Amino acid sequence: MIEHKPLYQAMITAVSQTLENMVFMEAMEHFDSAYELPADDVVCNSILINDPIQGEIKFAMTKTLLRKLTGNIFSLDDDEIEPEQMDDILNELLNTIVGLFMTNLLADNQEYKIGLPESHNEKVPEVDASTIVWKLMTSEEDAIQIFATGASLVALKDN
Amino acid sequence: MKRILIADDSATARMFIKRCLQIIGLGDAEIIEVEHGKEALAVAKKEPVDLLLTDLNMPVMDGETLVKWVKASPKLADLPIVVISSAGNPAKEKQLLELGAHRVLNKPVSPPVMMEALADFIDE
């Protein structure tokens, strides 16, 4: 059995720290637990967790938010933004969030291995009964959602 | 003027590092950006740099291999290297320090953490 800290909070802390340090935004739980990302305005990427547990984390937000972040980070006007820059930001955010999540989740000094972020697609991830979903939003009320799957990862879910 | 070499395959990550350097007072430094370790090694061998900030997971040549090559080069062996990684793995950190990395930092690096890590470099 893996020694670990509370899973749900580990992710919220990871997202908060990442957004605060990288895009100077706060993140918190979405006030509307029933909120769903609009299917026609969504981007999503994913990363595998390989060790000591196995699972997949998917990261989704609106394209509108990703464009806004890209413009802010690279100091670009909307018409100057390239899709590659949007991809790069989404991947760097997910990579950093999942690294911090694993550090927050596992007992001190426990090693872990994660993969590389996979390119995004424009679909809201499918959710089944075993998927853990975090519904978050930025201080400007832009929604961010995170989805965790994989038996050994989901088994660490808080009771 | 100090010359700082940043190796990271993510343009976003390089942007964050540059922003951090500006905030901690290294905005005047000449920043050279490359996307992987092999390119970093070529740049450092061609023209002297004062500091190398490198990601760990990069295509072509990763950060660990870059540290090994730099420390094995008589011309570059004294170059301070800070590895910035999203894989906060204590065993890997120990290994990188033993290979000669000056510091290993976890992403996301905040300006205070960067400032503390580069204190010696800034004071020079």
Image: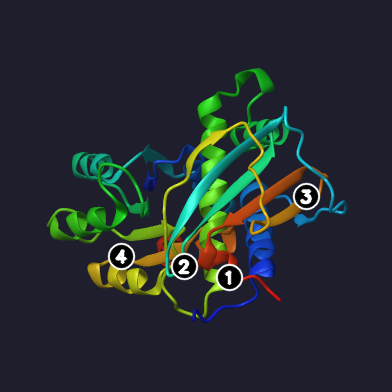
Quarter location, residue A68:
top right
Residue under circle 2?
A53
**In percent of the image, x 34 and y 46: which residue is there?**
B58
Q: Are marks 3 and 4 in contact (CB under 8 Å)?
A: no
Residue under circle 4?
B101
Q: Chain of mark 1?
A: A
The answer to whether residue A137 is seen in the rendering is yes
Give the number of the disc on residue A137.
3
Question: Does label 3 or label 2 sit earlier along the sequence?
Answer: 2
Q: Are marks 1 and 2 in contact (CB under 8 Å)?
A: yes
Q: In this rendering, which labeled residue sits more in front, label 1 or label 2?
A: 1
Give, as a three-letter code, the residue at label 2: Ile
Q: In this rendering, which labeled residue sits more in front, label 3 or label 4?
A: 3
Q: In this rendering, which labeled residue sits more in front, label 1 or label 4?
A: 1
Determine the CA span between mark 4 and mark 2: 29 Å
Give, as a three-letter code, the residue at label 4: Ala
Q: Quadrant of the C terminus of chain B?
A: bottom left
- SS at badge 3: strand
Give the number of the disc on residue A155.
1
Q: Is residue B76 above or below residue A140?
A: below
- Mark 3 Cα shell of 10 Å, populated few (<14), some (14-19), many (≥20): many
**In percent of the image, x 44 and y 77: which residue is there?**
A110
- SS at badge 4: loop
Same subunit: marks 3 and 2:
yes
Q: Are marks 1 and 4 in contact (CB under 8 Å)?
A: no
Give, as a three-letter code, the residue at label 1: Ala
Determine the CA span between mark 1 and mark 3: 25 Å
Front one among B34 and A156? A156
- Mark 2 Cα shell of 10 Å, populated few (<14), some (14-19), many (≥20): some
**In percent of the image, x 49 and y 50: which residue is there?**
A47
- SS at badge 1: loop
Question: Does label 1 or label 2 sit earlier along the sequence?
Answer: 2
